[in-house]
Image (spheres, rainbow, N blue to C red):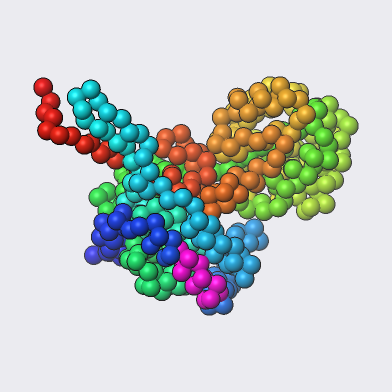
Amino acid sequence: MSEVVQKSKLAKQAAQTMGNLTTEQKNAALLLMADALVTEQQSIIEANAKDLERGKQLGTSASLLDRLALNESRIAAIAEGLRQIAELPDPIGDTLEDFERPNGLRIRKIRVPLGVIGIIYEARPNVTVDAAGLCLKTGNAVVLRGGSSALFSNEKIVEVLHGALNRSAIPADALQLILSADRSSVDEMLKLNGLIDVLIPRGGHSLIQNVVNNASVPVIETGAGVCHTFIDESAQLEMAISIGLNAKAQRPSVCNSMETLLVHEAVAAKHLNAIAEAFTSANVELRGDDRARDLVSSMQTAASADWGTEYGDYILNVKVVKDLDEALDHIRQFGTMHSECIVTEDAANAERFLQEVDAAAVYHNASTRFTDGFEFGFGAEIGISTQKLHARGPMGLPALTSTKYRIYGNGQIRQ
């Protein structure tokens, strides 16, 4: 029996009891997990250092190494995420509908766990904790398969979390980590119908598309983030630069960072040099269309493929557009339905943008970096869904539930 099948079976067995746990039992386990992470932070940092060293030897980019790195402050933030999850309302058992039929049947629709959730992700060890916390709070078991770049970190984190679960009502088998770094372990998870109830991929475009295209297990798709910020004609320049810099340079490796800046031609004519200088000072490489390069000759030329690229790095496309219509057309063509922003003082244009842009999160005068479960008050997130069925946007606790109808009768039979 392979590691994937063995651990998925253990998770399936644990899932049978997870739905019977009380909110108090689950919350107590989450708090034990949070405390354990802080107590064992030094051993986690030491394991993480092995991953970082291996990454450097393999030539991993600085931005990806940043996604991988753990330190005391990041571990404290991860633990705080668990504490916030513990404070959030437990959706399991919530009544969504309650009605009575003419024949006297009472029908009640409630939230229930999904069962066993498989998470396939890449270089961010914080996902290991976020996924565990969110899944366990909602009464689900979880099978994690992280990337090889974070193998030491993930193994140590799960070891620490298991230690905490062994002192709680949640069975430790409800949290499983696949240690095999072989691609076949992913391929095997994609076909484990009957053991895994739903798969959630988190990572780059190629990982997500592999899961979506090849899984027979149901998938909740989390999408790549080719995010845009449009500086409209009426935008306050200082605000626009501040929002743009935050969206691109605050943490460029994440999916909610901006990849393309769209600038109204009236703003570009007066201020594109100042805008470009602000980004260049933040070590952002600019790639512009012809109109942008006519105004700022130091920009590199944006190739046709660049407009649809999620860089995850200090690289930004810049395009000068005639008006809101051209900006909307560009986003329709190249956006990935993740996060889009308009900076404007024109209420009508803001409303059009918010209404017409088809994305999970659409912003007026705020950075796309806020598309995040923690920032939305969810405690943490399992991912950001860019699909339209079941869940969309940052997926917190309710997204990890299904529903069940409970029907109460007194002898009714169907005629």
Residue depicted at 69% across the width and 42% down the height: 367
Q: Is 158 on the left-hand or right-hand side of 73?
A: left
Asked if residue 189 lies left or right of residue 68, the reply is left
Most common secondary structure along the magenta stretch: helix
Extent of the magenta region: 30-41
Please provide percent x and percent y for residue 267: 83, 30
Residue 21 in sight: yes
Asked if residue 70 is positioned above or below residue 283 in the image, the reply reads below
Total numbered labels: 0
Residue 128 in view? no
Which residue lies at the image location 53% right of the left edge and 76% below the top edge? Answer: 39
The quadrant in which residue 272 appears is top right
Point out the image quarter for the C terminus. Answer: top left
Q: Does 255 lie within the magenta span? A: no
Q: Which residue is drawn at 62% across and 34% down?
A: 362
Q: In the shown orientation, is residue 358 left or right of residue 243?
A: left
Q: Position of residue 113 (x, y in %)?
A: 34, 49
